[in-house]
Every structure is written in structure tokens, then in C-alpha cells.
Image: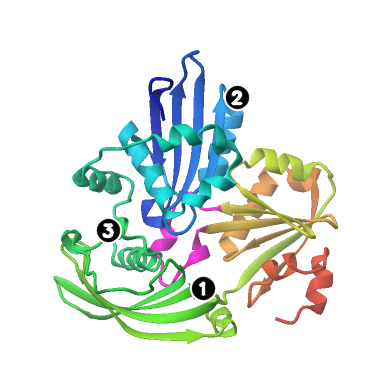
């Protein structure tokens, strides 16, 4: 950006670099003393700068709601960064996919300035920035899951922080292009006071196929870093086998809406939830405010999901969760907010051995009972 026209005021980024994504907020002042707020969503695996919003003297509530919408699902906290660090973060994301900015309408007014941005961070300063944008990894399971996740995403800068002394083994490779880690199961094979050797069974979304890769990883427990890693076995599997591998019980609560304006209020009151349109309704996704799921064994890609709220075109609300505690928390929140008295009627709870809500959302049915009656899982 031409800094003779815009004065940099401040910037902050989420400490979620080990998840492969970062939310970023930056404020500037132009020559008319007007405040400019920019909000970025940065993806370092495949999509580059895949979210950008530009506000000129924007309304505080609109800006805050946009920040929540962009960063609310990332599970991190904001860390203050300086101008050079801001430039480095957006430029390094841009390199991942230079075409990503072409899809962002608001970016057109920023494009010429963006092309003049330059950062002079040294390698040490880049490493220090990564360290500030990555949470402390204090447990072996978290280390293993982060390590496999970043390696599968071919996202090497933060992976370097997980290797002992930052010495990446260039001969170690799980995939040759960015992929998604769907599940990772770890087993401790041997352990001493200083070392631990684990086998990780990683289920990977590999282009249009799926792979299970078994990786042996040796950890130096004193510094909680990876010392050695190697692929033991790699096997392609079918989508049916992958689906079976990912199966988990699903808990659902089904309600009937009695207030036509409840969804509108729900949307306004929960700007941090991601909203998706479907043929038979709208889905709101609520994520946990942390990334504790990375410390779970097995790790699931969707483990950061707290609850799903699907408003059907038939006047139903279906709430889905992967554990009954989350569903109970939603039920309690509805009770505390008098939702049952004013806006909806509770019908029933349903537990299924396999996830069915996404199948319902992608079906031609707009009533979940009709769907369940004809569903063959």
C-alpha cells in the first residue's frame, strides 16, 4: 500500500497459524482523516486470501459482526502485529493462490496498493512471528495431530516449529500436494523418560480419492518436538470405506418453529456462525471458541464443531451435535432465553449411529421425519 496516502494505525491476527488459517484485522487512516478497516481470512494450504472486507468509516457494529463472522470459527485469540508482519502475512497467503483475490469484490479498490506492498522481515523475524501466532504445544497428542495436519497440508513454515531445532527432514513427505486430514489416530509404540515413538494412522482426503497413511513419529519429550518421522504404509481406500472410518453417533433435537421471525433474530444475534444456503433450508454452524479438539485421540477434522442449526423450509429447526453434552447445552440455552415459550415447540430428540443431518440437508425433503422414514444409511 502507498503509505504516503494511508497511515498504518494497527493490526492484529489470530494465533491459529498451526490450523493453517489466520484471521486478520487492520486499520488505516487516509488523508481525509477517515478510518479504514480491513478484515482478511487467510488460508495457507490452498485458497490464499479467501476473504476480504473493506470498510470506510464503517459502523462499529457492522465491523464487529464481520470480524466475528470471519474469525469466529477459527478458535483462537488475537495477537497484535506491526506493519511489516501484516504485509508478510497477506503476501505469503497471496503466494499460495495468486488468483484468489480475483474472486473478492471488495479487493478491487485495494489491488493497486496491494501490489506495491513489500516486507523486509528477516528469517528470524518471520520465525518469531510464527511463534507468536502458534499456541504452545504442551502435549504429545496435540503435537502429533498438528504435525500430521500441517504436513498433509504441505504447509511447511509452521511445521518447522514442530521439528526439533526447526530442522525439517526434507526426505519426509506424506503427500506431494495440499490435502485435508480427516482423521488421525495415534498409538504409542514405545516410551522412555526422554523419547516416545508413535504410530499415526491418518485418513486423508486425497483429490477425488482417500488414503490411509501410517506414519512413525519419534518425539523428544524434553522439548516436545518431532525428532524423526517416516511413512510406514500408504493405502488407497474407497469413499465407502472412508465414510465407515469417519462414522460417529449423531445427536439431534427436532423443534417446530411458531415464530416466523425467529430465524432472523437468531441470525442477528449470532454473527459468528457461518450460514449456508441449501435447497430445503439454511444451515448455521457454531464452532467451539478453542481448538482443544487437536488434543483428542482420534482427531477429527470437524471436531471443532459445537452444534449445527438447520432451519428447514417446512418450519422445522433441527439441531445437530456430535455429543449429547453439546445438545444439552443448546437445550438449556433455549430454555434460559425463553425460546420454548415464545418461538418454538420441542418435538423430540433422536440419536443415530451414523451422521444423517448432512444427508437430510442435501436431500429433496424439507421435513426431517419424512426423510428419516425413507432414509437408508
Q: What stretch is highlighted in magenta?
A: 287-304
Q: Is residue 296 magenta?
A: yes
Instruction: Please tell me in which quadrant of the rendered image residue 202 appears.
Output: bottom left
Q: Nearer the viewer, mark 3 or mark 2?
A: 2
Residue that appears at 58% across and 79% down? 243
Residue 332 placed where, x, y %?
64, 51
Q: Nearer the viewer, mark 1 or mark 3?
A: 1
From this view, report whether residue 81 is shown above or below residue 220: above
Q: To which residue does mark 1 refer?
A: 207
Secondary structure under badge 1?
loop
Residue 225 placed where, x, y %?
22, 63
Q: Distance between the residues labelled 3 and 2?
A: 40 Å
Quarter holding the C terminus is bottom right
Taking the image as shown, residue 294 lies to the left or right of residue 222, namely right
Q: To which residue does mark 3 refer?
A: 138
Query: Which is more toward the observer, 273 or 33?
Result: 33
Taking the image as shown, residue 92 lies to the left or right of residue 236, namely left
Residue 345 placed where, x, y %?
81, 53
Residue 135: mark in rendering: none
Classify 10 Å Cα crowding around label 1: few (below 14), some (14-19), many (20 and above).
Answer: few
Instruction: Please tell me in which quadrant of the rendered image residue 339 appears.
Output: top right
N-terminal-most mark, 1 or 3: 3
Residue that appears at 74% across and 82% down? 376
Whether residue 73 can be seen here: no
Q: To which residue does mark 2 refer?
A: 59
Q: Distance between the residues labelled 1 and 2?
A: 42 Å
N-terminal-most mark, 3 or 2: 2
Classify 10 Å Cα crowding around label 3: few (below 14), some (14-19), many (20 and above).
Answer: few
Circles 1 and 2: CB atoms closer than 8 Å: no
Residue 40 placed where, x, y %?
49, 41
From this view, report whether residue 356 is shown above or below residue 31: below
Amino acid at each position: 500500500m502507498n503509505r504516503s496516502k494511508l497511515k498504518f494505525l494497527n493490526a492484529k491476527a489470530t494465533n491459529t497459524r498451526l490450523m493453517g488459517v489466520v484471521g486478520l484485522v487492520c486499520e488505516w487512516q487516509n488523508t481525509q482523516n477517515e478510518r479504514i478497516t480491513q478484515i482478511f481470512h487467510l488460508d495457507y494450504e490452498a485458497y490464499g486470501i479467501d476473504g476480504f472486507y473493506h470498510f470506510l468509516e464503517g459502523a462499529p457494529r457492522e465491523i464487529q459482526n464481520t470480524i466475528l463472522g470471519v474469525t469466529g470459527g477459527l478458535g483462537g485469540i488475537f495477537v497484535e502485529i506491526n506493519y511489516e508482519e501484516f504485509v508478510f502475512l497477506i503476501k505469503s497467503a497471496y503466494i499460495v493462490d495468486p488468483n484468489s483475490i480475483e474472486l473478492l469484490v471488495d479487493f478491487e479498490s485495494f489491488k493497486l496498493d496491494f501490489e506495491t506492498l513489500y516486507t523486509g522481515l528477516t528469517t528470524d523475524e518471520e520465525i518469531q512471528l510464527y511463534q507468536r501466532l502458534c499456541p504452545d504445544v504442551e502435549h504429545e497428542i496435540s503435537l502429533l495431530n498438528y504435525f500430521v495436519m500441517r504436513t498433509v497440508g504441505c504447509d511447511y513454515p509452521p511445521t518447522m516449529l514442530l521439528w526439533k531445532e526447526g530442522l525439517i527432514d526434507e526426505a519426509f513427505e506424506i503427500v506431494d500436494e495440499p490435502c485435508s486430514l480427516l482423521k488421525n489416530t495415534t498409538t504409542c509404540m514405545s516410551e522412555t523418560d526422554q523419547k516416545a515413538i508413535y504410530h499415526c494412522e491418518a485418513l486423508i482426503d486425497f483429490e477425488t480419492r482417500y488414503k490411509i497413511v501410517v506414519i512413525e513419529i519419534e518425539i523428544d519429550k524434553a522439548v516436545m518436538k518431532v525428532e524423526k518421522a517416516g511413512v510406514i504404509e500408504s493405502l488407497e481406500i474407497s469413499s465407502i470405506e472412508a465414510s465407515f472410518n469417519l462414522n460417529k453417533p449423531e445427536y439431534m433435537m427436532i423443534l417446530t418453529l411458531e415464530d416466523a421471525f425467529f430465524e432472523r433474530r437468531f441470525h442477528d444475534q449470532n454473527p459468528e456462525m457461518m450460514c449456508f444456503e441449501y435447497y430445503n433450508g439454511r444451515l448455521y454452524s457454531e464452532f467451539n471458541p478453542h481448538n482443544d479438539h487437536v488434543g483428542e485421540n482420534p482427531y477429527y477434522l470437524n471436531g471443532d464443531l459445537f452444534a449445527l442449526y438447520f432451519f428447514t423450509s417446512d418450519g422445522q429447526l433441527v439441531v445437530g451435535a456430535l455429543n449429547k453434552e453439546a445438545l444439552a447445552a443448546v437445550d438449556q440455552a433455549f430454555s434460559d432465553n425463553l425460546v420454548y415459550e415464545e418461538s418454538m415447540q420441542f418435538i423430540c430428540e433422536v440419536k443415530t449411529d451414523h451422521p444423517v443431518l448432512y444427508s437430510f440437508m442435501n436431500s429433496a425433503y424439507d421435513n426431517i421425519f419424512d426423510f428419516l422414514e425413507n432414509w437408508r444409511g
